[in-house]
Image (cartoon, rainbow, N blue to C red):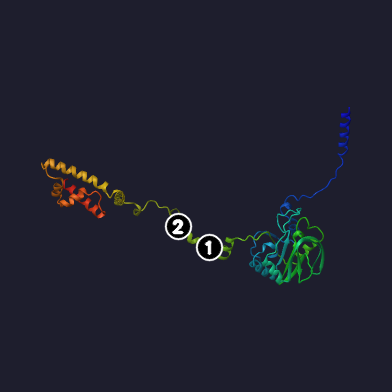
Amino acid sequence: MMRRILLLMAVSFLMTGCNDYIEKEREIGYKGKARVNPFLAFEQFVTKYSGKEILVSKNFGQLGDEDSIIILSADLITSEGYVRKLDSWISQGGHAIFLIDHAEMRGNEWSIFRADGEVSEALSKWFTSLNIEVVENDTAKEFGKVKIDKDRFNVKLNSGHALRLNGKKEQAIVSLEHGDGTLTIINDASLLRNRAIDEAEHIEIIAMLLDWSREGRLVFLRGVGISFFGMIWEKGWMIVVSLIVLLMVWLLRHMPRFGPIESEAKEAQLRAYDHHLEMIGDFHWRLDRGLALLEPLRRELQELCHHWQLKSGKIDEGLFEVLSSRSGIPIERVQRAMTEHRPADTMVFSRAVADLQQMRKAFL
């Protein structure tokens, strides 16, 4: 009975706690294209508001009169060559917008660990020459208001960098005329990102920056894409083309499969019989000083001489004397041709072979 009472009490306590909970909503991110492109809302706003064509590029390329605005992260410009190119383009009427922090393309909008941007030494020197100072703080600072030209705007920006123009107080956005164009620096790219673009007066700031630009295309630079081979092609394409032509000519001249197909082999390529004989003689000379070639001739001469002696009845005469008398070769040379084991050199070998052949003819 006691067990049943305890079981009932436990079930009643559990049932009373079933409705005791709190619902909370938490943002986990976007879906579709907005999840891949954190600047999708900005690109759509530019297209609808100003009608500008947007070019998303990973290469710096050549900026021209058809380009009105270029938006890029400050950490992409690391060389003085790019700085000079941008300075010249802005002076001719272009508008460059630099983003410092939170300008990465794959950053999580809801992550507390977001990498801060950097300003290269080349870019920092250029900003200093224009009386712009980029201050790097140890901790991120929130900015609620900005002053651009003579207008004031409410913003919600958070960055570890601050900007000073002409030594004045720190700001989040600095914009000034440079030649016939405009240079704008934004310390927090969240101003243009999907999650914060509709906060405070961010849209108004974007619209004003677009109105300050000339007619033309907007270039959104997402990478510089510096390539060694690309630089070679850009600066020395004539040398590259010349080397390729030389390589093709060399291949056509030296590699048969790249040239015309020959119907038959040339006579000069056919090895004659005497050439093969020469190779065989060279092999035997290296092997045993030609002894393998002399022995068959010597045995044949002995047999021929023996048959001749039997026929002529001169079986008692010596071998060397018969060979000498029949061929007309001195007996010393006959002895050397018939007995020398290893000729000293090719001249001795050739003389011995010639003598053996002459003696053989005497019996045929």
The quadrant holding residue 194 is bottom right
The tag on residue 107 is: none
Decide: is 268 above or below 7: below
* SS type, badge 1: helix
* Image location of residue 223, percent across then percent down: 66, 59
Front-most of 181 and 147?
A: 147
Q: Which residue is mark 2?
A: 252
The quadrant holding residue 228 is bottom right
Hey, what amino acid is under mark 2? Leu
Front-most of 159 and 92?
A: 159
Front-most of 80 and 325?
A: 325
* Image location of residue 189, percent across then percent down: 74, 60
Q: Which residue is mark 1?
A: 240
* Image location of residue 264, percent across then percent down: 38, 51
Q: Is residue 65 visible?
A: no
* Image location of residue 11, percent across then percent down: 86, 34
Q: Quadrant of the C terminus?
A: top left
In the rendered structure, are the residues bearing label 1 and label 2 in contact, judged by CB atoms less than 8 Å apart?
no
Q: Quadrant of the N terminus?
A: top right
Decide: is 210 above or below 357: below
Q: CA distance from mark 1 to mark 2?
A: 19 Å
Decide: is 146 above or below 264: below
Category of crowding for the residue at label 2, using alpha-carbon neighbours closer than 10 angstroms: few (below 14), some (14–19), many (at least 20): some
Query: How many numbered callouts?
Result: 2
Q: Residue at x 18, y 44 (%)?
A: 302
* SS type, badge 2: helix
Question: In the figure, is residue 351 to the left or right of 21?
Answer: left
